[in-house]
Image (cartoon, grey):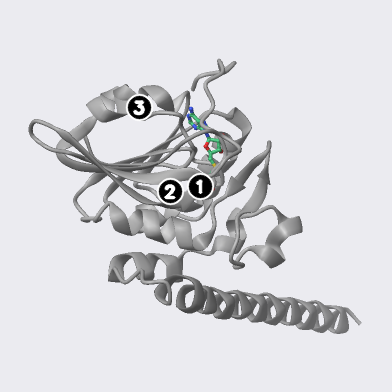
Amino acid sequence: MKVFRWIGIIILFLLSFTAVKGQEEEYARLRERMVVKQIENRGVSNPKVLKAMRKVPRHLFVPSKYIDEAYEDHPVPIGYGQTISQPYIVAYMTEVIDPQPDDKVLEIGTGSGYQAAILTEIFDSVFTIEIIPPLGKRARERLQRLGYGNIEVKIADGYYGWKEHAPFDAIVVTAAAEYIPPPLLQQLKVGGKMVIPVGSPFFTQMLVLVEKKENEIVTKNLMPVQFVPFRREKIQKDE
Ligand code: SAH
C-alpha cells in the first residue's frame, strides 16, 4: 500500500503548490491595482520607479499579521513602533531623486527593507542604515533571501551617514528629522539630491528636496507628510 501513500503525498504537494501559486497571483493582482490607483493616478510616471513598484513583493516586507494590508494605501506597523511607508510615498520619494542606474544611493531608516529593495531594483549600488538592531538584521536577512545582492545594510545612527562609501548621488531619509543632518549634506555629491521629511516628530512634517549645487544648497518643499521620528539615542551594538 506504499504506492497509495506516495500518491497521497504527491497530491498534497501539488495542492499546496497550486494554493501558493494562486496566492502569489492574488498578490500580483493587488500590487498592480496599488500601482495604478495609488501611484500612477497620483502622478508618479518614472518608468523605472513604476517597474520596481510592480516587481517588489511588498507583502513579504510586512509582519504576517498585517499581510492583508500590505498593498493598502497607508503605512503598516513593522514592530518597535516603526512603520513601512505608504506605497505612494515610497514611489514619490524614489522619483524625486531623479534615479539614474549608475548612481550610488544611501537610505537612512532601513525599517522593513522595502524602500531599500525598490532602490536596489533601480540603482547599481545601495547602502542603507538602520538604528534599531533587530529591524536592521531582519531587513538584511530578508533582502538576502529575496536575492538582492547590490545592497549593504549597516546598523548605526544614520545621522552620521556612511563616510566610507561617500559621496552619494542621492540620499533618501525615511524618518522625520528636526533639521537636515550636516554629515548627510557633506556626503552628498555636488549635483546630488536628498529627500528628507523635516519637522517635529508627532506633527505633520514637510518633505523636502535638497539639491547640492557648486556653491549653494537649494531646498524645495514638496508636500506635508507624517513619518516616524529620526532617533538619536545611543545604540547598544554597532555592526
Ligand atoms: N524605509 C523603511 C521605513 C521605515 S520607518 C521601509 O521601507 O520600511 C523609519 C525607520 O528609520 C525606522 O525603522 C527607524 O528605526 C529608522 N531610524 C530612525 N532614526 C534613525 C537613525 N538616526 N538612523 C538610522 N535609522 C533610523
Which residue is more in the foreground, 13 or 106?
106
Q: Which amino acid type is marked by label 3? A: Gly
Q: Position of residue 84 (x, y in %)?
A: 57, 50
Q: Position of residue 105 (x, y in %)?
A: 29, 43
Q: Is residue 204 placed above or below 58 in the rendered structure?
A: above
**Label for residue 113?**
1
Task: For marks 1 and 3, give the one nearer the viewer.
Answer: 3
Q: Secondary structure at mark 1?
A: loop
Tell me the quarter of the image containing the N terminus: bottom right
Whether residues under marks 1 and 2 lie with C-beta atoms below 8 angstroms apart, the answer is: yes
Q: Is residue 122 visible?
A: no
183 relative position to 189: left or right = right
185 relative position to 153: left or right = left
Which residue is more in the foreground, 236 or 197?
197
Q: Which residue is mark 2?
A: 116
Q: Which amino acid type is marked by label 2? A: Ala
Q: Secondary structure at mark 3?
A: loop
Mark 1 near ligand 1 (CB under 8 Å)? yes
148 relative position to 135: left or right = left
Task: For marks 3 and 2, give the one nearer the viewer.
Answer: 3
